[in-house]
Image: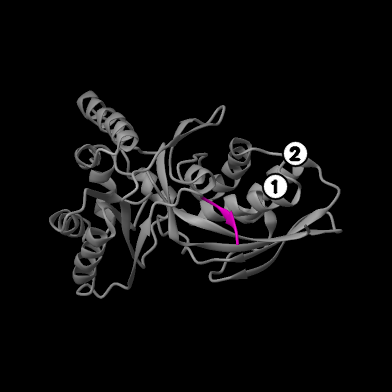
Amino acid sequence: MNEIKIFSPATVANVACGFDVLGFCLDSVGDDMVIRKTDKKGIHITKIEGFDLPYEAELNVAGVSALAMYEDAKPDCGFEIEIYKNIKPGSGIGSSAASAVGSVFGMNELLGRPYNKTQLTEFAIKGEAIASNCEHADNLAPALFGGFTLVKSITPVQILEIPSPDDLYATIIHPQIEIKTSESRAVLPKKVPLTDAIEQWANLGSLVHALHTSDYNLISNSLNDVIVEPYRSQLIPHFNEVKQAALKNGALGAGISGSGPSIFSLSKSSQVALKVKDAMNKIYSKTGIKFEIHISKINTQGVKII
């Protein structure tokens, strides 16, 4: 096999109380990528559709992760990468992670899978760092592993896979404004009160337990962010209004997707997710801000061959 086409999914990171460690994978939105072997050595990005991104491999998220893997694998070939970008950069649903994951996943398949998913995460982190100015894997991990994931450690990389209840659906509204990850990190406090830290890690532990036991009530009670959301929510127009509308219409919880501006909610059943979508739509239709809304079952497979 010399060419492969893949779907690299969007993801929701942080998931309220899990800042920089927790994420889940979507199945209704993602990038398409084509990776092919070439006789010409090196990494070459030959086509980009959807958004204006650099073709130079060392400046492109997909290229940087691919170069990290290429330098380690030292294959007797090169690779061409085509990117069909469906996730808007700066959307808060893992645009850079989808690019970083897609290139290394595709190359790994064409080379006969010499690397496992944890090793692929290590390469993809190098690309993700270009977009956010730091190495983190809360979007990368769910895109590679699927479902919910917890980043136990970055050095060394250790990813824990968390089961997802069968009837859990996400509704995500993406206002068409851009909030860069680096900018959204700049508004965060350097220190937090111990009482807030205790509440946050209790919520995270409870949420992980709730996902393992399919306890929807506990999921609802755990989806609270007392550290990051109070600061980042100020960057997102109508955040509190959207969150309250989601809860009023039956959502288990809602919060900021990644660094924003996207807002996610989780619901028990597709019917409730649809009600939440209608409520979000009603609010943003009055704002004059362009937006998209996605409904997605939790994608338990992650990146895949089309």
Where residue 177 sits: x, y (%)? 36, 65
Q: Is 1 displayed left or right of 222 in the figure? A: right
Q: Residue furthest left?
A: 248
Does 304 lie within the magenta span? yes
Write the residue at 19% across / 57% down: 246
Q: Is 42 displayed left or right of 208 in the figure? A: right
Q: Identity of the amino acid at label 1?
A: Asn
Vertical relation: 215 (above or below) 181 = above
Q: Residue furthest front?
A: 166
Q: Secondary structure at mark 2?
A: helix
- The numbered mark at residue 72 is 2
Q: Identity of the amino acid at label 2?
A: Asp
Vertical relation: 261 (above or below) 283 = above
In space, the residues marked 1 and 2 are separated at their CA atoms by 12 Å
Image quarter hosting the C terminus: bottom right
Residue nearest the viewer, comparing 234 with 293:
293
Q: Is 306 displayed left or right of 111 in the figure? A: left
Residue tagged by mark 1? Answer: 108
In this picture, which residue range is highlighted in magenta?
Answer: 302-306
